Amino acid sequence: MKIYLPLDAAAKALGADDVAKAVQAEAAKRGIDLTLVRNGSRGMVWLEPLLEVETPEGRMAYGPMTVSDVAGVFDGSSAKALGRTDDLPWLRAQTRLTFARCGVIDPLSLDDYKAHGGYAGLTRALTMTGAEIVAEVSASGLRGRGGAGFPTGIKWKTVAEAKADQKYIVCNADEGDSGTFADRMIMEGDPFTLIEGMTIAGIACGATKGYVYLRSEYPDAIAVMEQAVRIARTAGLLGASVARSGFAFDMEIRSGAGAYVCGEETSLLNSLEGKRGVVRAKPPLPALEGFLGKPTVVNNVISLATIPVIFEKGAAFYQNFGLGRSRGTIPLQIAGNVKYGGLYEIAFGLSLGEIIDGIAGGTASGRPVKAVQVGGPLGAYFPRALFDTPFGYEEYAGKGGLIGHAGITVFDDSADMLKQARFAMEFCAIESCGKCTPCRIGAVRGVETVDRIARGDTAAIPLLTDLCDTMKSGSLCALGGFTPYPVMSALTHFPDDFHATAKEAAE
C-alpha cells in the first residue's frame, strides 16, 4: 500500500506528522506493507492534512485528516473520502506549470523528479550557447515573480555581457509578505526545480556560484533545500562539471535573520555579505556590481523555478499563456477571510472577481467581501467595484495597484479600512532599514497622522495624502515607496471609514 502525506509546513502545522505516525501504526497493526511518501502540498490548505492513497484508478484523496480518521481509510469506510485527487475542482481548473510536480512527487527523490520531466530543461540548455539560453528566456516573456515584474531575460543578458572574473546567481527566497507562501511550497515540495533553474541561469550568464537566501522562519524549507543540494551534488548535477558538460556551477543555502527589507535585492546582498541589511543606492545595479561587487543575477524563487518548464516545453509554449505583457502563469496565494485558501496556479488574465467569488468561494465568515489586498502588506486594497480588473501587471498598475508576489488577502465588511491604513504605516515604521528619511521618518509621521484622523481630525487627511506622495517619490526602495498604496487605496475607495470617526466625535 502506498500513501502520500505532505511534509509541507502548513500541513505539519495542521497535524500531518501525527497523522503520519497513526498511518504507520495502523499499517503495522494490520500487517500491511506500507510505503509512506512525504510529498509537498497540493495547495488546498483547507483540506490539509491531505492524505492520498495510490490505486489502479489513480490517487484517492482524503481530508482534512485527523488521527481518528486513519482507521477509516484502511477500512474503506472513511467519511473524509474525496474521490480522485486529479478530479477535485480546485486542481482540475488550474494550469500547473511551475507547480506541476508539487504534491505529486517525493521532493527528495531525484529519480521521481526526472520521471516527471525534471532535468529535461537543463539537458536542452546544455545544447545551447549562453546567448541562445538568454534569448529563449527573453522570448518566453517571463518577468520577475517576486514583485517588480522586471523582464528576466534583460537581467540575464546584462549579467551575461558584463566582463568579470566571477559572477553569481542569487535566489531571493526571503518571502516576507504576509499571506504569501509560494516560495516555501516549491522549496519544500519540489526543490530540484529551483536547483535546475539556478543551474541553467549560471550556465547562461557565466556564473559558477549560486546562493539561495532563505528566511530563518522557514526551517523546513531550509532543511529540504540543503538536503536537495547535497543530493544534486552527489549525482554530479552541481559541481566542477555539471552533468559532465564542462560547465561549473555549485550553490549554497544561506539563512537570514528575518528582516522584511531583505526582500529588497540590495538589502539582501548586504545581508548575504555579512553586513547590516540596508538598501544600497542605485546605480550601480546588482547586475553589474552585486554580490561582493561582481555581476549578479538576483531572481525570485518562482522566477528561477519556472526556467526548467520554459526549456522543457519551449519559450513559445510558455509565452502562449497570459495577456498583454504578462506572460505565462502566476501562482495565486489566496488567504485571509476566505472559504478556500491556498495556492492556485493559473494563466494571467482572470478577473479579480472570478478569483475571489469563484476560486476562493467568497468569505469564510459568509459576510460580503469588502476589500481585497493584492500584493502583500504593501499592496493596494481593491473594492468590489474593481473586481473586473484582469490579473496582469499593467492592468493592476492602471488601477493604482500592484501584483507583487501575487498574495491575495480578503476582508469582509466588518473590516475597518482606517485601521488597515494605520497598520501599513506601522508596518513600514517597524520594518524600515532607516537608510532614507521618507521611509524612516515618514512612516512614523504616517501613524501619527492616521491616529489624528481616527480622533476625528479630518483636516489631517490632506496631510496624509501629501505624506504618501513624499514617501512614494522619495524613498530609496519599495518598502517606503509602496506603503502609500494600501494607505491611499483605503482612503480613496473607503472614505466613509475615515470620516465616520469625525461623525462619532461630533455626536
Image: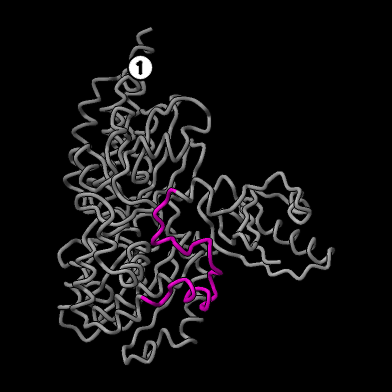
Give the magenta-colored segment's residue range.
93-120
In the image: residue 311, left or right of residue 131: right
What is the residue that sits farthest to the front in this orientation?
A: 57
Which quadrant of the view contains residue 32?
A: bottom right
Q: Amino acid at mark 1?
A: Ala
**Which image quadrant: the N terminus?**
bottom right
| 254 drawn magenta | no
Residue appearing at x 33%, y 18% in the figure: 456
Q: What residue is at 39 percent from the left and 40 percent from the top?
A: 355
Per the image, the residue denoted by label 1 is 500
Q: Nearer the viewer, residue 264 or 467?
A: 264
Q: Residue at x 39, y 43 (%)?
A: 408
Most frequent secondary structure within the magenta stretch: loop
Q: Nearer the viewer, residue 280 or 329?
A: 329
Whether 117 is among the magenta residues is yes
Label 1 neighbour load within 10 Å: few <14, some 14-19, many 20+: some
